[in-house]
Image (cartoon, helix red, strand yellow):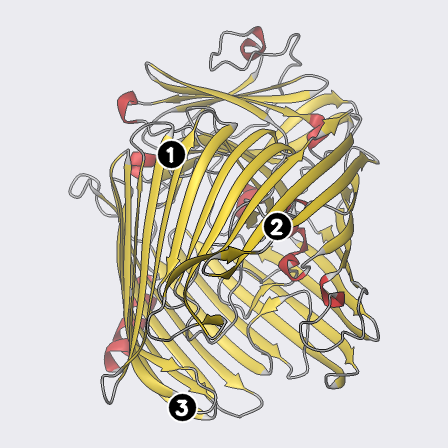
Amino acid sequence: MKKSIFWIIVLLMLAGMADGSVPLQKVLPLAPAKAVSPPLLDGSLDDEAWKTAAVVDDVWITYNPVNGSELPQRTRAYVTYDSENLYFAFHCFDSQPDRIKTSLTKRDGIFEDDWVGLSLDTANGRKYGYELFVNPSGAQGDIFRTGEMEDSSTDWVWYSAGKVVADGYIVEIRQPLKNIRFASGKDVRMGVLFWRRISRLGMSGSWPHLVPGQGIGVSQAEIRISELPQPLVLEALPSFTYSSAWNRLSPSSWSGADQTRDLGFGLKYGITSSIVAEATVNPDFSQVESDALQVTTNQRYPLLYAEKRPFFMEAGNLFDLAGVGDGLGNMGLPVNTRLIVDPRWGVRLTGEQGRGSFALLAAADRSPGRAWEDGENPDLGRAATYWIGRGKLGLGKDNYVGFLYSGREFGAEYNRALAADFSLRFLKNHQLVGHYIRSFSDRPNAGGEAQGGYLTAEYGFSKGNTFALAMVERIDPGFQMDTAYYQRSGISTLKLYFQKRFVPDKKRLPWLLSVVPNMYAAVIHDRVSGMDDKELQLCLDSNFILKGSVGGSVYFAQECWAGQEFQRTLGQAYVNLQPFKWLNLHSCLSFGDAIYYDPAEPFLGNRVQWHANFTLQPSRSLNLFAERVNCRFRRIESGERVYNQEILRGRLTYQFSSKFFVRGLVQYDSFNRRALGDFLASFTYIPGTVLYLGYGTLDESRSWADGGWQRGVTGDRYFQTRQSLFFKVSYRYQF
């Protein structure tokens, strides 16, 4: 404890140290001339459109892993437009072009490469941003940002090209206006921020400078366009999905094919250039990519799986609340659309008007009305309906207030929640964020009526290389929110976080980029049991060249479970490295005390968890990823092994082009004694116009005895117990 107090005092003293000076940038509004003819996207800047474009030829400043240094390689950016598109181009100079890392990869697979891109605030309201990234081969990645929260699952239609040249690489982008929301008319104002990643250095920089504590919206430059007309936004999205599955009935026989054929149809219409309505009937919610296996043994809280279904992925983070998603709060997602299991229909309305923005979502879920394996479902055939609404009002810069309504109705039961939130930056380096949620529920067959509140408030300070955060949280025992992912109710929490980044002398230690000590502390009071959890974590992270990072931490905790109090100490260490542009390495290890979460008889044990993976890219088209996770748990008193779970995962991908790839995925779980195989051929012309052909297989360890399958007996061996075939085609027709 004395050592912990010593390190806390050291960190607080370091907070007062001065940060280094930041290179000056000349940030002026960009006023591009209208292009007479559109540029050809070919990785060349010879077109007339680029000769009349607005140009940014200035210093770019790093924001990761160090904030405030000059990015070592020069970058030039171009902006122009016509009546149907926005155009961007980048000349990324590089003194060592042979060390540029690039690949042919599917969308959003570029972030281990060199890349360049932009964040485009089409309404200049500092609330949202379309973020576009392109690697030197022209492959794309895109993210939809709300405030400071980013969602990479959203895809929209835009076009790009890239080419490695003698002095670096060139990227060109065309963004059709019909595929983004903006305020049409005269004197159109948008916000933009450009950024670049140099993979081998592990460094990212931007223009304008991303000032700590001010957010992307405040840092962006302004684009001024004399006039943009309202485009016609009308899309139809028909889809067809076929699947067939077979189950093994005995060691020598299989069931007949369980076939499913689904026709779906979606429609999108732009009411104005900034308000879009969407509807879908019997939507195709097939999950093309399998969920990654996770360590499921001895988990105190439910696991959260990412959304992978197209309709829900688009701008799903519009429903986030201030103070959610930073890793400190108990609330993970206020709207977790994976809880809508089997949708029958869905509608959505999103847009911006003046300083306000809104998002509405409704859907019907057939899964609660399915037939039960045992007994009769009294609500057979009935669907649960979800009604979700979100609104924000900008208060200048990137400050806002907002509200959220979230409701689920099913037969005689309901769950409804009303929320208000705010984000307020003041005095340049300070920020207050928070939200309050009030829930109302009635479950006639499970506890009757209940209501409760959920309050979160955060204060953050960020200046230069110093960051501090304090958070308080209070959740009533009766709080329930059916659309959300959260871990606990009935608690009051105080959490503190502090971080200080040090930048060594470049001449003395050119290989070391930064050293970052940080501290996390928390007290969690259980309002039902009256017991307290206490946590203290001290960390030290460092970043160096070759995209390297090394760090470790020590964690002290008093954790209460099932009416008992346990003292825990846990150590962690990790290393990341890119020794060559074709190889990425990662490994992490955690070891120490852990609780076996048995409600009847919990006990303290020793847990060791090791995770390692590598990515091998021998050519632009071929990519091999391999991963191992091992988790072992033993009783402290006797040394008896309680469990040992190992997960192995391998993925081999060959990318014929940025649109067409084939992929094989194999996963193995030793604890549950099962192996998954997932093979996919995918062609994506544009998001929405896709063709998938997949085959899946499940192998499980079983024995056949007494005319049935048994597990855990002598003589178990692996059988292929299930196989499936899947085909999907959809076409996005834009009028």
Lower sequence index among marks 3 and 1: 1
Q: Secondary structure at mark 1?
A: loop
Q: Residue at x 42, y 41 (%)?
A: 664
Whether residue 514 appears in this view of the structure is no
> Which circle marks residue 257 in the picture?
2
**Above-or-below relation of 257 to 237:** below
Q: Is residue 520 shown left or right of residue 217?
A: left
Q: Is residue 703 shown left or right of residue 579?
A: right
Query: Which percent across, then down, holds residue 129?
Result: 61, 40
Query: Which percent across, then down, holds residue 310?
Result: 64, 44
**Above-or-below relation of 233 to 576:** above
Using the numbered discs, state the Cα–Cα distance from disc 2 to disc 1 in whole angstroms: 43 Å
User: Is disc 3 in contact with disc 1, using a CB cutoff of under 8 Å?
Assistant: no
Lower sequence index among marks 3 and 2: 2
Q: Identify the residue position indicated by label 1 in the image.
A: 113
Callout 2 amino acid: Ala
Dot 1 alpha-carbon crowd within 10 angstroms: few under 14, some 14 to 19, many 20 or more: many
Callout 3 amino acid: Glu
Using the numbered discs, state the Cα–Cα distance from disc 3 to disc 1 in whole angstroms: 47 Å
**Above-or-below relation of 173 to 338:** above
Q: Identify the residue position indicated by label 3 in the image.
A: 565
Q: Secondary structure at mark 2?
A: loop
Q: Residue at x 72, y 83 (%)?
A: 446
